[in-house]
């Protein structure tokens, strides 16, 4: 049986490849580095890299989130300004979460089945819908 991840399992550097498949108009790709570093009793996730929209130029992109240990072994994720984003149970067979940001809806499913072993990796797949948003964003993190 595979050990279920805890918050500190993510500490350190990961290469990240992200694909954004839009229902209407251009798909995108992000390649970069995701670093989970100690921050305020939890971990600060900083993603830096390069984004490219199909048929358009490349540009630098960065985003940050704070991951903290939550109740009952959950991991709570916050925007870098302190607002709550979502929480998930990493011990679940298929961890998922939901975030309402009216008028948009964000649903994520994590896959940690390959997190243990010689080449640790995990994925996060977001389905985002709303009046002006309709895309699936799949991010693969591989231990650097």
Image (cartoon, rainbow, N blue to C red):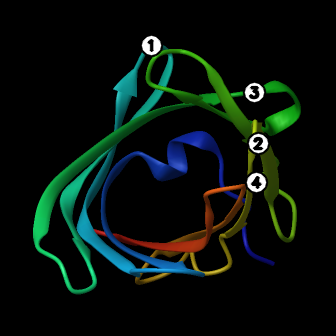
> Which label number is shown at residue 99?
2
Q: Nearer the viewer, mark 2 or mark 4?
A: 2
Q: Residue 106 location, x and y as percent?
A: 72, 53
Spatial CA span between label 1 and label 4: 21 Å
Q: Quadrant of residue 112?
A: bottom right
Q: Which mark is residue 93?
A: none
Secondary element under disc 2, as helix, strand or loop, is: strand
| Residue 64 picture location, percent across and down | 37, 36
* 98 to 95, vertically: above or below: above
Q: Secondary structure at mark 1?
A: loop
Which is closer to the viewer, label 1 or label 2? Answer: 2
Q: CA distance from mark 2 to mark 4?
A: 17 Å
Q: Earlier in the sequence, mark 1 or mark 2?
A: 1
Instruction: Write down the residue under mark 3.
Output: 70
In the figure, 98 relative to 107: above or below? above
Of the residues under marks 4 and 3, which one precedes in the sequence? Answer: 3
Q: Which residue is mark 4?
A: 90
Q: Which residue is mark 1?
A: 40
Spot occupied by residue 23 in the image (x, y as percentages of width and height): 60, 81
- Crowd tier of the residue under label 4, counting other residues whose Cα lies within 10 Å: few below 14, some 14–19, many 20 or above: some
Name the residue rendered at 35%, 77% in the picture: 28
Separation of marks 2 and 3 at Cα, in angstroms: 17 Å
Marks 4 and 3, how far apart at CA: 11 Å
Gap in angstroms between the C-alphas marked 1 and 2? 23 Å
Answer with left or right where residue 130 lies relative to residue 63. Answer: right
Residue appearing at x 39%, y 21% in the figure: 39
Secondary element at image label 3: loop
């Amino acid at each position: 049986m595979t050990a279920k991840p805890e918050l500190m399992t993510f500490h350190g550097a990961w290469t990240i490849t992200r694909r954004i498949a839009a229902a209407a108009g251009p798909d995108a790709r992000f390649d970069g580095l995701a670093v989970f570093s100690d921050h305020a009793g939890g971990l600060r996730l900083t993603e830096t890299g390069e984004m490219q929209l199909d048929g358009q130029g490349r540009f630098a992109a960065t985003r940050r989130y704070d991951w903290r240990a939550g109740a009952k072994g959950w991991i709570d994720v916050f925007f870098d300004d302190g607002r709550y984003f979502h929480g998930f149970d990493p011990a679940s067979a298929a961890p998922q979460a939901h975030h309402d940001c009216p008028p948009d809806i964000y649903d994520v499913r994590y896959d940690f089945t390959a997190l243990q072993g010689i080449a640790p990796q995990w994925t996060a797949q977001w389905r985002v819908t709303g009046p002006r948003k309709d895309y699936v964003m799949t991010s693969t993190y591989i231990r650097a």
